[in-house]
């Protein structure tokens, strides 16, 4: 149904399409939709500590919006966006979300990165009935009719990755490392359960460091002493730069010592330096180097818009899916109304996604493949494994809590 | 706590932890030196200290790029040039800031706090506009990476040794300047009694400006050194600043010896605790120790007798 509507829409000039869907009919709840325009919100941090990460998301969302507009818009209407800055501050995120929903009446919002910011805006979206497209891989344990999660939840990323490393590398012992906040702790809890109860192997160390920590010499000493088969590192942000530089300086050779991460994308490697992380494995759903026509087109368009030197990480791609999934859902529902979009979302398919075919699950997460890449000195990942099928999202996994 | 390790392993644990502690000590001391000089001599709390460090780091990044592009043959030596450039640029900016901003606020210490905080925000935004929001990767010459094996289980990191050596040299130079130069004599006089120093003909304004410039220059060199171990991004300075303040306040702010002793105490307790507890716990306990000691000695570890 979704695709049929899209191809019908593509044949009609957008003005005719807009007439076919009169505003009064497709917008019964007073959203910012006119006969020619529809307004959406972009809500990310462009200042503060998260700006480094969220810049890519903003760029991807703007690219998607531009492409959608160039191909005729949504139900014949051009997308206009209002961008707000969450400033890496969770109360600010909530305040700006309220402003977008109440004052600007936006038809949907693409935004947030950290779980903390998502948790802060969630009650706002539920109270004022908005729709949020959230792009980051995250710890799961959440589901809302007002959110579409376009990144992976924990089981899609962690379990498939651990299975792969256990099988391919014969790994028996794991050292878990992370930054000290909700996402790494919850993710490692799932990882530990999987390692101990399902793989029947051992965790020889688990440790957390404050955000922004820059001294990893002690833990590197411990790693050298306990000699784990796998270092499982989910440190976030700038700390990564310190960690990988010190690891290399301490003589840990990632070509001999297996390291698996779920938090270092091509974006982070820019700061770490490819030569410091080459040989490490990353488990996520997207790498810039994915070899398929959709992705080639996407990477080309992204670089054309934002510069040859930009890199595209997992979350950037997931952010790019947001506006497209929203457009497809609106066209499937034949309406901009939030309730109708929420109801129409399950089953929406996006075949042209750079990561390949994706589909929205009833729990508002995406079916997606899990992939493992190996870091190269040029800052890109070589794809070395992908699941044969799409992995079903399961935000509330049994036996892992 | 010691379970599972043989005696030999425990021996190398302590050796390696002691070495990690020494690296941490050098890092703390490098970070805190500039801040301590400025605070000790002028009573100005420089909230932009972290940004001066990052300025040094960005200078290193630029230098490495220039060397890579134009004189790749000399790449292995670029780091020394980079440190000199970092010192000069950060120091020059420090002098300019002192002249434009700080000297107008000497009578109002709280205002200098606000003004330098504003300055730090301006500098962060400037970095973001010039270098982009993302971290930049500073490439290191090969000889700085890797480690020297001492025994089977003990390795000595080359860049750790480098930072330690650098810290030694800079601390030595600062000590020489403070205790053997005319400027140092004037600084010590001004710290002891600013009004009287002025009355006997010391140009306190000039002493202040030089001190501020020197403090900022040292921050730049520290930042340059930190590209080996840390990240270089517009807000990375914030990562260092809390530890830096901790060292300075704990040390007593006005003496070189205090800063050294405080950096040593904090780094060794943190490094030891980190091995036997987790990273976050070590930080919490270190903070608690510092707070506890500060309750006993609010003025810090070492204090100069100052006439007011």
Image: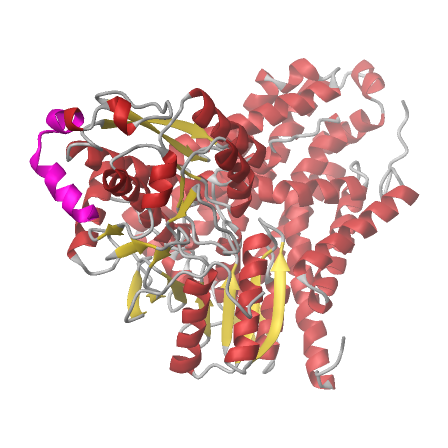
* Image quarter of residue A202: bottom right
* Image quarter of residue A189: bottom right
> Coloured how?
secondary structure
State whether residue B196 is above or below residue B137.
above
Q: Quadrant of the C terminus of chain B?
A: top right
Along the viewing direction, whichever of B228 and A88 lies nearer the viewer: A88
Residue at the (71%, 40%) spot, across then down: B245
Q: Is residue B76 magenta?
A: no
Q: Quadrant of the N terminus of chain B?
A: bottom right
Q: Does residue A371 appear left or right of residue A352 in this picture?
A: right
Q: Does residue B276 appear left or right of residue A75 in this picture?
A: right
Along the viewing direction, whichever of B60 and A340 lies nearer the viewer: A340
Along the viewing direction, whichever of A219 and A336 lies nearer the viewer: A336
State whether residue A198 is above or below residue A9.
below
Q: Is residue A175 visible in the rendered structure shown here? A: no
* Image quarter of residue A303: top left
Residue B49: x %, y % from top left: 61, 35
Residue at the (56%, 72%) spot, across then down: A193
Residue B125: x %, y % from top left: 47, 29
Q: Is residue A8 magenta?
A: yes
Q: Is residue B55 visible in the rendered structure shown here? A: yes
Our reading of the magenta stretch's main secondary structure is helix
Along the viewing direction, whichever of A217 and A329 lies nearer the viewer: A329
| Count of numbered circles in the view | 0
Q: Does residue B171 appear left or right of residue B298 in this picture?
A: left
State whether residue A188 is above or below residue B31.
below
Q: Which residues are magenta?
A: A1-18
State whether residue A280 is above or below residue A169.
above
Q: Does residue A123 appear left or right of residue B290 in this picture?
A: left
Residue at the (49%, 32%) spot, across then down: A86
């Amino acid at each position: 149904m979704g695709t049929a509507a899209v191809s019908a829409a593509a044949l009609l000039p957008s003005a005719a399409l807009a007439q076919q869907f009169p505003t009064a009919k497709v917008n019964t709840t007073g959203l910012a939709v006119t006969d020619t325009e529809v307004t959406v919100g972009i809500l990310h941090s462009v200042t503060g500590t998260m700006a480094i990460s969220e810049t890519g998301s903003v760029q991807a969302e703007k690219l998607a919006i531009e492409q959608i507009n160039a191909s005729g818009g949504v139900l014949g209407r051009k997308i206009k966006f209002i961008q707000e800055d969450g400033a890496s501050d969770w109360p600010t995120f909530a305040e700006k979300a309220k402003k977008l929903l109440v004052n600007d009446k936006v038809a949907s919002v693409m935004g947030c990165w950290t779980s903390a910011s998502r948790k802060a805006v969630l009650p706002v979206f539920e109270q004022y009935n908005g729709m949020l497209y959230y792009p980051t891989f995250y710890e799961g344990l959440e589901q809302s009719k007002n959110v579409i999660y376009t990144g992976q939840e924990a089981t899609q990323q962690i379990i498939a990755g651990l299975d792969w490393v256990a099988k391919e590398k014969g790994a028996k012992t794991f050292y878990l490392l992370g930054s000290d906040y909700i996402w790494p702790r919850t993710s490692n809890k799932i990882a530990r359960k999987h390692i101990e109860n399902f793989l029947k192997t051992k965790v020889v160390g688990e440790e957390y460091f404050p955000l922004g920590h820059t001294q990893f010499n002690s833990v590197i000493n411990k790693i050298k002493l306990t000699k784990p088969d796998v270092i499982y590192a989910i440190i976030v942000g700038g700390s990564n730069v310190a960690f990988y530089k010190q690891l290399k300086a301490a003589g840990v050779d990632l070509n001999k010592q297996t390291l698996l991460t779920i938090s270092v994308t091509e974006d982070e490697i820019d700061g770490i330096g490819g030569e410091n992380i080459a040989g490490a494995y990353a488990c996520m759903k997207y790498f810039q180097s994915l070899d398929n026509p959709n992705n080639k087109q996407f990477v080309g368009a992204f670089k054309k818009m934002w510069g040859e030197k930009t890199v595209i990480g997992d979350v950037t791609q997931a952010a790019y899916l947001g506006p497209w999934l929203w457009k497809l859902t609106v066209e499937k529902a034949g309406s901009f109304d939030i309730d109708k979009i929420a109801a129409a979302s399950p089953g929406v398919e996006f075949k042209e996604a750079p990561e390949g075919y994706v589909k929205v699950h009833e729990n508002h997460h995406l079916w997606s493949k899990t992939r493992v890449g190996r870091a190269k000195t040029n800052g890109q990942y070589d794809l070395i494994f992908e699941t044969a099928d799409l992995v079903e999202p399961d935000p509330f996994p049994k036996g892992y809590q | 706590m010691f379970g599972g390790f043989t005696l030999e392993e425990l021996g190398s644990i302590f050796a390696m932890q002691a070495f990690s502690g020494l690296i941490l000590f050098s890092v703390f001391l490098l970070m805190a030196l500039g801040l301590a000089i400025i605070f000790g001599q002028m009573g100005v709390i420089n909230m932009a200290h972290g940004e001066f460090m990052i300025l040094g780091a960005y200078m290193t990044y630029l230098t490495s790029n220039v060397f890579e592009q134009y004189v790749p043959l000399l790449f292995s030596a670029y780091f020394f040039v980079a440190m000199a450039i970092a010192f000069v640029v950060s120091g020059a900016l420090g002098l300019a800031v002192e002249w434009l901003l700080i000297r107008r606020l000497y009578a109002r210490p709280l205002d200098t706090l606000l003004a330098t905080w504003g300055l730090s925000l301006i500098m962060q935004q400037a970095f973001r506009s010039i270098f982009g929001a993302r971290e930049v990767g500073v490439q290191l010459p090969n000889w700085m990476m890797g480690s020297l094996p001492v025994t089977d289980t003990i390795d000595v990191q080359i860049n750790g040794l480098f930072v330690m050596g650098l810290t030694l040299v800079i601390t030595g130079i600062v000590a020489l300047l403070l205790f053997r130069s005319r400027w140092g004599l004037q600084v010590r006089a001004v710290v002891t009694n600013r009004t009287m120093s002025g009355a006997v003909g010391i140009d306190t304004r000039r002493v202040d400006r030089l001190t501020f410039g020197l403090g900022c220059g040292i921050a730049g060199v520290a930042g340059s050194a930190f590209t080996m171990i840390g990240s270089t991004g517009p807000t990375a300075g914030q990562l260092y600043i809390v530890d830096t303040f901790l060292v300075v306040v704990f040390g007593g702010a006005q003496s070189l010896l205090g800063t050294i002793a405080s950096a040593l105490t904090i780094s060794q307790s943190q490094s030891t605790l980190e091995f036997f507890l987790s990273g976050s716990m070590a930080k919490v306990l270190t903070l608690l120790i510092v707070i506890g000691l500060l309750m006993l000695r609010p003025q810090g570890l070492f204090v100069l007798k100052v006439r007011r």
